[in-house]
Amino acid sequence: MKLVVGCGYLGLRVARRWRDAGQRVATVTRSSERAEALASEGFVPIVADVTRRSTLGRTLSELPALSGLPAVEAVLIAVGYDRAAGLSQRDVYVGGLENVLAVLADDVQRIVYVSTTGVYGGDDGWVDEDTPCQPSTPGGAAHWEAEKLLAASRFADRAIVMRMAGLYGAGRVPRKNDLLAGEPIAAASDGYINLIQIDDAADAVVAALRRAAPPITVNVSDGHPVNRRAYLEEIARIVGAPAPRFVEPDASARPARGSASKRIGNGRLIATLDVTLTYPTYREGLAAALKAEAK
């Protein structure tokens, strides 16, 4: 059995791939309603909040009760951050990971932790997995602390850390609605952004469990950073929106991805995991995503 902790935009796609390959998959979600939907797809649903250790292991009432998380061979930890929950990113990413690691059985063979390329900070220039981590945002700092927690845990020799670039795809095309509304973009127009299409990201996670020899850290990016203006102009062209307008971001606001300009290399992803990207640049990915959304 495999376990997905955080069955959202990325986690659900990975869970479906494992299920379709004949694997039994358990999924952790905070919502009973969401758990019902996951059960209808053939998953073993676990209703739990990773920030509350005592909840880990509660299944739906009609399923056998668990005294902890089920015995599994591999775990994907892809927890998202919900600002409405009133918790800090450290509470979710660091505290949540600590709780999950505490209740996992010792015989888990692989743990994939979904981190972010935000751990590198926002400096200019090309970045690979050996670049020192100097996060400049709360999210990047929390993920970097979580990575170090995993590396110091009893599962360190089984850990695969996947640092995701910006995830996008059908249902998630950043800034599309702003462009359609003619809203100005509060970000530097000439900075670089790093992206990975959601299905390529899910394929990379599946490939990591098959091919990666842990412990290993892998940047998951299409390897073709794009100028922010060019990216937004392409969205505007496809959806028929006005050309993007930029304004200086509020200097007093919290640091954001929009202030970064690093360029993420993906050499290890391609060479080590033998991944062939379906969407090798933002052009192919945006065209497919926006076409799907228009249906």
Image: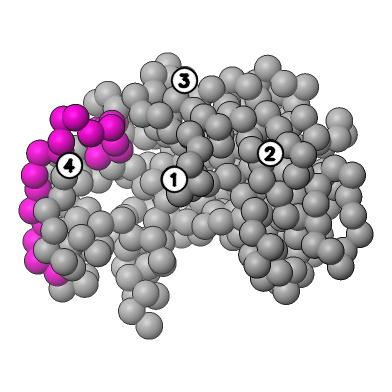
The image shows residue 127, relative to residue 42, as above or below, that is above
Could you tell which of marks 1 and 4 lies nearer the N-terminus? 1
Which residue is identified by label 2?
52
Q: Mark 3 — residue?
A: 130
Q: Is residue 210 above or below residue 96?
A: below
Residue sitting at x 16%, y 66%: 181
- The residue that mark 4 highlights is 187
Q: Is residue 18 or residue 10 the one in the foreground?
A: 10
Whether label 4 touches label 3, CB < 8 Å? no
Alpha carbon of mark 2 to alpha carbon of mark 1: how far? 17 Å
Question: Which residue is the site of mark 1?
Answer: 83
Question: Which mark sits nearer the N-terminus, 4 or 3?
Answer: 3
Q: Residue at x 63, y 22 (%)?
A: 149
Task: Give the residues in magenta.
Answer: 241-262
* Mark 2 or 4, closer to the camera: 2
At label 2, the amino acid type is: Arg
Q: Is residue 58 above or below residue 37?
A: above
Does label 2 or label 4 sit earlier along the sequence?
2
| Dot placed on the residue nearer the N-terminal end, 2 or 3 | 2
Whichever of callouts 2 and 1 sits on the residue coming sooner in the sequence is 2
Q: Residues within 10 Å of mark 2 (few under 14, many from 20)?
A: few
